[in-house]
Amino acid sequence: MRAPSGPDVAVGDVLLAVENVSLSFGGVKAVNDVSFDIRKGEIRAIIGPNGAGKTSMLNIINGFYQPQQGRITFKGEVRSKMRPHEAATGGIARTFQNVALFRGMTALDNIMAGRTLKMRRNFFWQILRYGPAMHEEVAHRRRAEEIIDFLKIQEIRRVPVGRLPYGLQKRVELGRALAMEPELLLLDEPMAGMNLEEKEDMSRFVLDANDYYGTTIALIEHDMGVVMDLSDRVVVLDHGIKIADGAPAEVKSNQAVIDAYLGVAH
Amino acid sequence: MAPNAAAGADTFPKLLVRNARVFGARPAMRHKDLGIWQTWTWAEVLDIVRAYAVGLHRLGLKRGETIAIVGANRPKLYWSVMAAQMLGAIPVPVYADAVADELAYVLAHADVRFAAVEDQEQVDKILSVAERVPTLQVMLYDEKRGLRDYDHSRLHPMEDVIDEGRSALASDPSERAWIDDQIESGKGSEPSIILYTSGTTGASKGVVLTNERSIKAAADTVTFDKLTENDVALAYLPLAWVGDHYLNYAQGLVAGFCMACPESADTAMQDLREIGPTFYFAPPRTLELLLTRVMIRMEDAGFIKRWLFHYFIGVARRYGERILNGESVPLMGRLLYSIGSLLVYGPLKNVLGFSRVRVAYTAGEAIGPDLFNFYRSIGLNLKQLYGQTEAFLYVTAQPDGEIYSDTVGPACPNVDIRIAENGEVQFKSPGMFTGYFKDEDKTEEVMTPDGYVKTGDAGFFDEKTGHLKIIDRAKDVGRLKDGTLFPPKYIENKLKFYPNIREAVALGDQRDFVAVMLNIDLTAVGSWAERNNVVYGSYQELAGHPLVYDMIEKHVAEVNKSLSAEGVMAGAQIKRFLILHKELDADDGELTRTQKVRRGFIAERYAPLIQALYDGSKEADISTQVTFEDGRKGVISARVKIRDMKTEPVAVAMGKAA
């Protein structure tokens, strides 16, 4: 099964492709012979019922899990598996289903942490905080402030994230991922547990990040309305198998998808 | 600084030119952007605004046309106002949070052809009602984000307009002469701005203010409060509100002081602390919120800090106000107060951003004496003013050293005030408006033939202090059967200043005497009950408890005493009261969603209780339907007791007015 590349998709080259990837935990096949691609500049949604293998798929892409079979092509380089540091240095950033921030650190410091990979000066320069290191710090701080402005979280800049409400923590996490200036941004249920207003805000930020920074985005989401509004293309997984792939409207009317979500009479 | 603060300039653009000349290198505006305070000097502002005006002119903005300004307090929006005024166009600021409907109404009514807005949100809002504003042709925006893919045939980033103006000025020397001529030929009698009133009653009206009147008014108050170019204000109040336009924009230009724009609406409190303004305005609600926040944080503090705080706040309550007013205070009091300053008041003011405040005002609604005195006691020179958009804000203001929590001060310099037959306050002031935009009838309604403006507020001059006291909206003020003035809200506010009283409904219009129905505050009375071993199972039980009645009776007696001392109000003392068995609730339609009492509805619903208040019964039965949070309905029945009150003897001979 190759992903159909419809003519209606106005995006660039393939940025990342997974081909015939399988992953199993003991006897459980989490991902089974799945292939799809993510094109430059698009918003790609991965959907599916609980346990469909969506998060496993993201974990394969950023190298947290290593698939037993299949190939991953990222920016033209073919690998049998990704490693986390390769993914990070290669320009893949992500957020997590259950927020994974440094809870004792401020929102600003968390976002600055996202710049770590971009810091050139070594540890000893950083300790000196003088000359080149200071200069670098200022440049990174500026980027961090731009992201704070972008996400409209100025008022929580100095607040330890552990004290923030959940919706704002999610926003800070997105900020940290954006601070990496990723080429590919993986969002694992960015809207989970949010109220309508927070969802609308978050959707706005996802769209703006895509538009403003040109970031390619792959997201897992449960809220079908959000998926249909945001994404350019949708891939649907069920029990580790890809059952559909295409434009949102197409996928929505696909019988296999309807059955997977609503269940079928046996 | 200069005794004649405006120094002959009769328009705002001329003032800007003067400021660039006199205070050229001093800061005119600050804005926190990307976490850093950016500063523009008066010379830089003039430079930008000149370029902006040229750019606007090239887009087609002409003298006498209107331009809408929509958004938060940002330098570019203030510059839009200045640039429009430079061309002789009239800015029309609109509240940033106005819903699309209101926005459409104002934009259409003001015939705007241009709109300068903050960001995508406002652009979208205006586009959604575009067909209702047929005159609108050009939109300018400040924040570029999200607008890249929009059709840019009639949409321009402000930055580009300014740049275009700047390059035009650079390449063509005649442009410079032209714009300077535009500034010169501006007339003081031309409208400088149209401010739309928020419109609590009916459609909003456009208040037209002129250059020279605005400047005259601002010059008077700048002198009154001795504001100079060294002052700093934080522009955090809505741009479209007369308060912001007056206090920050007009006074800023007249005195040459610096106006700082917060990073965002949510950071205003932090920005306040960083900027340390010297001139500050806050409505009572904001002051209350700040105090509550401090109190909550103090509860979490350690034992020693908490003790210090409460001890020295006690000291401040005893001596603080008297020290601020320059009265004589025992040496020990002075000593304790200065220790308190060092340990408590100073740090507290620093946290609140009040360290450098020299003049602070509050207005808009009645402020509780406790709240007012608290801020004054820690050394904040908080004063009250009374005004309205039609007056270009100031009608009265309290001068330093004559501060009372229950007055709004004497008439401002050059302002004439009189009280009409029906108790309504009328004024004539240097800054007063010339009329409502495109609404002759309404203008005629509020202007008396001899040139006074009717405020719609009822008030009287306090005999002791000579200050004005505002009691209520004139149309809400009733009369007892014998003709005594009966201002319900005035009485209710006096009652509600007691923390134990949550809500009050005063009755008396066309009746023999004043009676009130009260709600106790469950939190305040509940904690009192805990401390005094009063056992109760429900709100209803607590409300009906004889000890609670005793306590509330004391409050009512105090209110009577204060009413008796106020001449015209003495006849409106409370003769009977009861405590309602349930809390008035918006879900039951007894309050509006903004927590205002709906008198008509309550009169109907509690008719048996009202009847009992006036027929002399000692108690009455009532059953009312209630709506629970989940939408279910139920019925509460109760027997409510009624207490008689003694009234104080009328202090002065002139008890009954009219």
Image (cartoon, coloured by chain):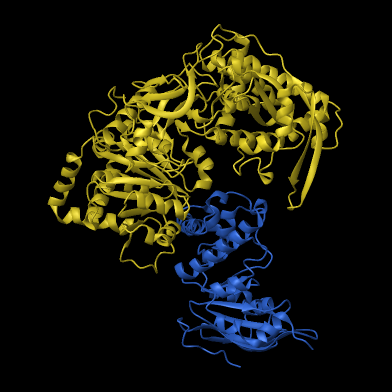
Chain colours: A blue, B yellow
Q: Which residue is drawn at 79% across and 89% down?
A: A266
Front in this rendered view, residue A62 or B235: B235
Left or right for A7, reference B484: left
Report x, y in % for residue B24.
Answer: 27, 37
Front in this rendered view, residue A40 or B572: B572
Q: Which residue is drawn at 60% across and 63% down?
A: A199
Rendered position, B468 above or below B80: above
Q: Image quadrant of residue B515?
A: top right
**Residue projecting furthest to the bottom:** A1
The quadrant of the picture occupied by the N terminus of chain A is bottom right
Rendered position, B79 above or below A244: above
Query: How many numbered circles are shown?
Result: 0
Q: Image quadrant of residue A230?
A: bottom right
**Residue projecting furthest to the left:** B174
Q: Image quadrant of residue A2?
A: bottom right
Q: Can residue B12 be seen in this view?
A: yes
Report x, y in % for residue B121.
Answer: 45, 58
Report x, y in % for residue B358.
Answer: 46, 26
Front in this rendered view, residue B174 or B340: B174
Rendered position, B492 above or below B163: above
**Residue projecting furthest to the top:** B653
Q: Residue at x 29, y 24 (%)?
A: B2
Front in this rendered view, residue B33 or B133: B133
Q: Which residue is drawn at 54% across and 30% down?
A: B476
Q: Is residue B384 visible?
A: no
